[in-house]
């Protein structure tokens, strides 16, 4: 359709889009008019400076299956959904506002491994005190970050727990889940865009694509909030 509008060949539009995505990916996420966060270190500094809480979670995006015979073909198979996908780590504010989206990795990569490879542990250990909420898949990061990553409580009784203990654990899990659920809202807003819902292009371009969409989404959210405050 855009090719018809501008009177050019379809390949010209495809090439132009391919050149724009990396530029948008490096643009970062907008948190206020004229203020952007481009790296995970900047996001941690932003959260710590204001005493804010962050929420981290991983999301999977379906991609085309690698060609038969490729040695890394099985790396893209998700153990969770048993489909070919890539995984990105998403970090939002306490209200679900998107602050960071990592480059995509094959879906076989565990969420806690992805967090370490993205530098989350290093930035939290070296950065300001900040609370990061996470699900049970990130248990173990709390000890590595001085308690900055908060996950659901461990079960001390593996077998035949007392009734009172079950009630306490259930209450704590519900409190933690109610605080952490906002990250799911942020991921849902991200996947309202077609590209992160299911990627049909080259897998090598997925990192630029999802980070570009994250930047556009954060800009849209900032513009909407500014308009509402002006009214």
Image (cartoon, rainbow, N blue to C red):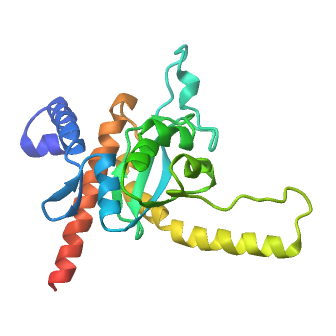
Q: How many marks?
A: 0
- Residue 65 % position (x, y): 51, 29
Task: Please report the residue visible at 81 percent of the width from the left and 70 percent of the height from the top.
Answer: 166
Which quadrant of the view contains residue 24?
top left
Which quadrant of the view contains residue 210?
top left
Q: Is residue 26 visible?
A: yes
Toward the viewer: 162 or 186? 162
Relative horizontal placement of residue 15, taking residue 90 as reference (left or right): left
- Residue 8 % position (x, y): 9, 35
- Residue 14 % position (x, y): 21, 34
Q: Quadrant of the C terminus?
A: bottom left
Task: Please report the residue visible at 54 percent of the width from the left and 15 percent of the height from the top.
Answer: 71
Task: Please report the residue visible at 22 percent of the width from the left and 60 percent of the height from the top.
Answer: 219
Toward the viewer: 192 or 190? 190
Residue located farthest toward the right when viewing the structure as drawn: 160
Task: Please report the residue visible at 12 percent of the width from the left and 60 percent of the height from the top.
Answer: 34
Relative horizontal placement of residue 181, taking residue 90 as reference (left or right): right
- Residue 147 % position (x, y): 54, 56
Asked if 43 appears above or below 179 in the picture, the reply is: above
Toward the viewer: 47 or 186? 47
């Amino acid at each position: 359709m855009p090719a018809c509008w501008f009177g050019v060949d379809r390949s010209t539009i495809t090439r132009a889009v391919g050149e724009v995505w990396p530029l948008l990916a490096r643009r970062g996420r907008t948190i206020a008019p004229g203020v952007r966060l481009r790296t995970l270190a900047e996001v941690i500094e932003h959260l710590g400076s204001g005493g804010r809480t962050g929420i981290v979670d991983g999301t999977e995006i379906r991609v085309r299956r690698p060609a038969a015979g490729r040695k890394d073909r099985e790396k893209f198979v998700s153990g969770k959904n048993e489909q070919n996908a890539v995984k990105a780590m998403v970090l939002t504010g306490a209200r679900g506002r998107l602050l960071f989206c990592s480059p995509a990795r094959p879906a076989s990569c565990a969420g806690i491994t992805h967090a370490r490879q993205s530098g989350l542990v290093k930035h939290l250990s070296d950065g300001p005190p900040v609370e990061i909420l996470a699900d049970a898949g990130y248990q173990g990061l709390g000890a590595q970050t001085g308690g900055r990553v908060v996950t659901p409580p461990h079960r001390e009784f593996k077998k035949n727990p007392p009734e009172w203990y079950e009630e306490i654990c259930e209450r704590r899990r519900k409190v933690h889940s109610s605080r952490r659920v906002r990250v799911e809202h942020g991921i849902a807003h991200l996947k309202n865009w077609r590209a992160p819902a299911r990627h049909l292009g080259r897998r090598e371009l997925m990192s630029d694509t999802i980070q570009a969409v994250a930047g556009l989404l954060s800009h849209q959210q900032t513009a909407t909030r500014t308009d509402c405050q002006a009214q």
